[in-house]
Image: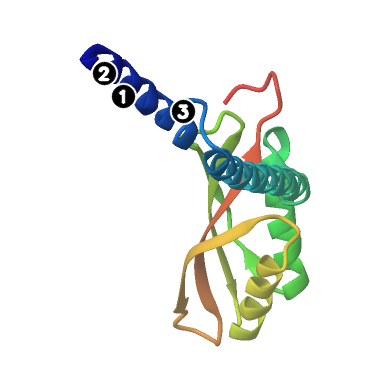
Amino acid sequence: MRAILGVLLLANVAAAVVAFHPFGGGADDLRREQAGLQQQLVQLRTQVTNAQQLATKVRGAREAGDEFMEDYITEGRVVTSTLQSELFDMAKATGITFLPTTFAKESIEGSDTLMMYTINAGCIGTYANIAKFLNLIDKSDRFLIIESLVAQPQQTGQNLTLAIKINTFSKQMPGEGL
């Protein structure tokens, strides 16, 4: 009799486990799992959308950078002659005397195609003419950075002597030596 009661008790416990908490999960468990998966799907779709937007922005930035390089950076093989000529023309247009210039070339760390040129130039002219010259440098089609300038009055007359240091960049084409 005890054995039969034990078997019946065991069968009742097994039936209760199956009825109240099935091994495959109940309807509530499946709904919670579905809600969790829906939320995960929404998050993944948001991540994909963000990644696509980021890729579009990166592509746009790359195109803008390439366009900037094309418009404002001079090719390496002609940078000294082009800038020398341009600075001389600016000086002539503003009525100042342009003194000889020197160019120093430096490689840029992390870039295989860009070089930085430092131009040391001097000129003599009136304050107004030098101001016009600096304005022309500032508005140049080239990417010119005035690093420093020193203006000193001459002992005779109203002229100033200007020493100017300008930085610019050049792009090296394939096959050119850095």
Residue picked out by circle 2: 6
Closest to the observer, 129 or 41: 41
Q: Farthest left residue?
A: 2
Residue 96 vs 40, above or below: the answer is below
Q: Quadrant of the N terminus?
A: top left
Give the spatial CA distance, label 2 vs label 3: 18 Å
Give the spatial CA distance, label 1 vs label 3: 14 Å
The amino acid beneath tag 1 is Leu
Q: Residue at image x 66%, y 68%?
A: 138
Closest to the observer, 164 or 49: 49
The numbered mark, 1 or 3, whose residue comes first in the sequence reads 1
Q: Around disc 2, counting alpha carbons within 10 Å, would you say few (fewer than 14), some (14 to 19), or many (20 or more)? A: few
Residue 133 image offset from top left, x and y in percent: 67, 72
Give the spatial CA distance, label 2 vs label 1: 5 Å
Residue 155 vs 82, above or below: the answer is below
Res. 33 image quadrant = top right
Q: Which mark is residue 9?
A: 1
Closest to the observer, 144 or 29: 29
The numbered mark, 2 or 3, whose residue comes first in the sequence reads 2
Closest to the observer, 82 or 50: 50
Residue picked out by circle 3: 18
- Mark 2–mark 3 CB contact (< 8 Å): no
Q: Farthest front residue?
A: 1
- Mark 2–mark 1 CB contact (< 8 Å): yes
Residue 158 image offset from top left, x and y in percent: 55, 87
Residue 65 image offset from top left, x and y in percent: 70, 47
